[in-house]
Structure formats: structure tokens, C-alpha cells
Image: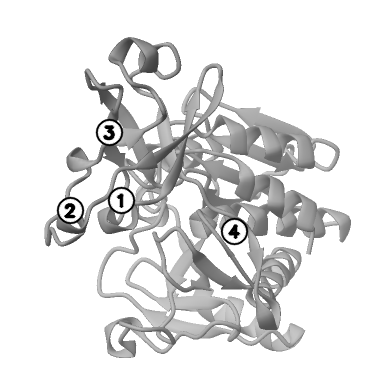
Amino acid sequence: MNEAFLKDLLSAISVSGFEEPVQDVVEQELGACADEIRRDEMQNLVAVKNPGSQRRILLSAHADEIGLMVSNITAEGRLQAVRRGGIVPHTYPGHQVIVRTEQGEIYGAVEASRKLLKEPELMEKEFLIDIGADTKEEAERLVSIGDPVVQDTHIRRLAGGRFCARALDDRIGVYIIMEAFRRAAEQGCDLGIYAAATAGEETTKTGAYRAAARVKPELAIIVDVTYTSDCTGMDPAESGPVRLGGGPVLCHSPLVPRGLNRQLEAVGKELGIPVQWEVASDLSHTDGDKIHFANEGIPILLVSIPLRYMHMPAEVADERDVEGCIDLIAGFLMQYR
């Protein structure tokens, strides 16, 4: 694995609507490999190979993460916040956070009490973030309304090739599509490849729609994470048996043409890459839901990475799944005609 690139991606703070730090990392990493790097007003970044080709394939993964946004500063200097994306409120009280400001990072702690933690319907408006200030005026010198907030977590190696971090959903997808882009380019792929790190998936999904509408691809491959069924509280009856280390996950979805799924599965068999299957009843809850309806309609493939503890401060993935996904997509790009 390109550990330096992955670490830089995971270390960036990019609450939905504030994706620039992740995009800066991608641009620096892919600048020498891509023929073009395009960035737009939505904060999408698209790395392009072979822009003159009439056959265009879009790779899409979202750069944004869930988090909070400062909405108020109290007379006592505490910060209040609203959510950006599907946070799990009970994971915040008692934990450290980082506020990204124009002046740099400010550290804080979310106030906690036993009474608060017993609230069955805890809402983010109940959070009070202590940054060490004692007055509103003191806090306002450090933080502004609208600043994004994330949990202050660490990147850790676990046993068995697993690793743990915040925002693997979907920084790991961004890493995968950019490495697949690089490998396909190194192998001489002559298709037009457009690898898009998209903005706003956790909130509006408008970034993906904008990127697809402008690229006008004949096919899009969306890479995101999916729930495993091999951890507490997960039921394989809901979407299928998916386990960490079992390989990339393909999807029986009404959005995905069965013929494309068969092609991708065949590439996996040829390359010796095991794949897993999940099922979806309707929409995918990924950028594919918007990309599919762009222009006159774009056929999509969904390729997912098994993930434990999604939207928690300690998500867990397996590097074997990551490497398999990169090789699977690069191999598909080399064979697609």
C-alpha cells in the first residue's frame, strides 16, 4: 500500500462542504501521473488520463466526511453545533474534538455527564464543546460560526492487516480510485479515465451529479464502503454476508446492470481476486444514486469495501480488501471494450 498517501488522506479534515484539504492531498499525489487535474466550484477534484479519448469512464468516491459545524457560541465560551451528515450523537460526549478554523486547528472536549449519556434521543444541539475559553468574547477570538468540527482520533494498525481510523468512509474509496487510476495509466490504458473525488456525498450528493454531468461518461464505477455482517449488531439477512478480508463487494442492485456485474466478476476470477456480494432493495445510498440519473442516464457499477463500525470514530478496514479493489478496477479498465 501507498501508506504515505493513505495517511495524508486520513489525516485531513473535510467535513461535508469543506473538502479542500483532501483535494489538496490528491492533487499533490496525482499531479505527476494525471494528464489534467480539474477542480470546480463544488470542490470536486477530477484526475484525468487520456482526455482526448472519446470513451470516458468515471471513477467516483466521496472526499467528505461526517462531522459538526459550529452554530453558536454561548456566554460561557462553549461552542454549540449542528450536524453535517449522519453522525452518531452518543459517540461525541466525553470525547476530544478538533475545530478547523481560518487560523488553524483548535482543540476541544465535548461536555459529558451520566445524565446526558442516558438520553435515548440525544441530539447534537445538546452538545457543549469546551475549548478552554471562559467567555463568548474569548472564544470568538479563536472560533467562528460555520467552522467544521471532527472527532480527534488516531490512525492505528491492528492485527491481521487491519487498520482503524476516522472517515475511512470514504477516504479509503478516494485512495482506491486514485491508485486504480495510477495503475491503469502505468499499464497503458487508452480509455479516458476520470477519477473524481466528489464533494457532499454525506449531505446532498450534488458534487457527484455535477462531476458526472460535466464528464459525460459512458460508464461510472462508484467506490464506497459497506457494512460487514461479522461484527456485533449486524444481520446478514439485511443485505448479505459480508466479512472483513473477504474481498471487494459487488452489489445486486436495481441500479446496476447484471451484465456489467458479470464482467467485473469475470475480471476478478481471471486475476484471482475473490469478490463478495451484497443485495440492495432500491437506492444504494452512495453517489451512484445521483450519477445514475445524470445526463441521459449513466450505467453504474458499485464496488464496496467491507467496513466495521461505519460512522463511528473508529472504523476498521482490511488492507487485503483495499488492494483487491484497486487491482479489480484497474484490471476492468484494461479489459473494458
**3 vs 1, front mark:** 1
CB atoms at circles 4 and 2 under 8 Å apart? no
* Residue under label 2: 116
* Residue under label 3: 81
* Residue under label 4: 172
Dot 4 or dot 3, earlier in sequence: 3
CB atoms at circles 3 and 2 under 8 Å apart? no
Quarter of the image with the N terminus in it: bottom right
CB atoms at circles 1 and 4 under 8 Å apart? no
- 22, above or below 141, in the image: below
**4 vs 3, front mark:** 3
Q: Bin the neighbour count of mark 3 within 10 Å (Cα to Cα): few under 14, some 14-19, many 20 and up.
A: many
Relative to 98, 189 lies left or right? right
Gap in angstroms between the C-alphas marked 4 and 3: 27 Å
Mark 2: amino acid: Leu
Mark 4: amino acid: Ile
**Residue 229's x, y, as percent?**
40, 85
Dot 3 or dot 1, earlier in sequence: 3
* Residue under label 1: 93
Please, which residue is most extreme toward the front here? Answer: 134
Residue 218 visible in the picture: no
- 217, above or below 199, in the image: below
For the residue labelled by badge 2, is the local secondary structure a helix, a strand or a loop? helix
CB atoms at circles 2 and 1 under 8 Å apart? yes
For the residue labelled by badge 4, is the local secondary structure a helix, a strand or a loop? helix
- 85, above or below 78, in the image: below
Quarter of the image with the C terminus in it: bottom right
Gap in angstroms between the C-alphas marked 3 and 1: 13 Å
Dot 2 or dot 1, earlier in sequence: 1
Gap in angstroms between the C-alphas marked 2 and 1: 8 Å
